[in-house]
Amino acid sequence: MPTTAYTVSGMSCGHCKATLTEVIGELDGVRGVEVDLDTGHVTVTSAAEPDDAAIAEVVGEAGYELTGRV
């Protein structure tokens, strides 16, 4: 299973972590989500290569900005 790390701006608290874990985790093929507030990284484990556009879309809809892969 591929693991991909992204940089996300705008995260600052436990609510941010919970929100992103939930919205990214609901995407098809996502098996796990780890959010590190200190580094601003979100690591996604998926069944196949992740859809960066879909992840960026749900992150944006949640009020954050995916700025790219780490």
Image: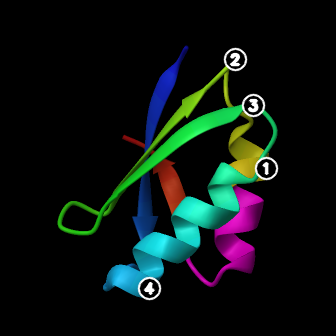
Q: Residues within 10 Å of mark 3 (few under 14, many from 20)?
A: some
Tag 2 secondary structure: loop
Name the quadrant of the N terminus.
Answer: top right
Label 4: which secondary element: helix
Closer to viewer: mark 2 or mark 4: 4
Which of the marked residues, 2 or 4, is nearer the chain's N terminus?
4
Foreground residue among 15 and 70: 15
Q: Secondary structure at mark 3?
A: loop
Along the line of sight, the residue nearer the viewer: 36 or 53: 36
Residue type beneath disc 4? His
Residue that mark 3 sits on: 29
Residue type marked 1: Ala
Q: What's the residue at 50%, 59% (across, down)?
A: 67
The residue shown at (67%, 79%) is 62
Mark 1 and mark 4 residues within 8 Å of each other at the beta carbon: no
Alpha carbon separation for disc pair 1 and 3? 11 Å
- What span is in magenta? 56-64
Tell me, for residue 48, which label it has, or none: 2
Q: Looking at the rendering, which quadrant does residue 48 occupy?
A: top right
As drawn, the label of residue 54 is 1
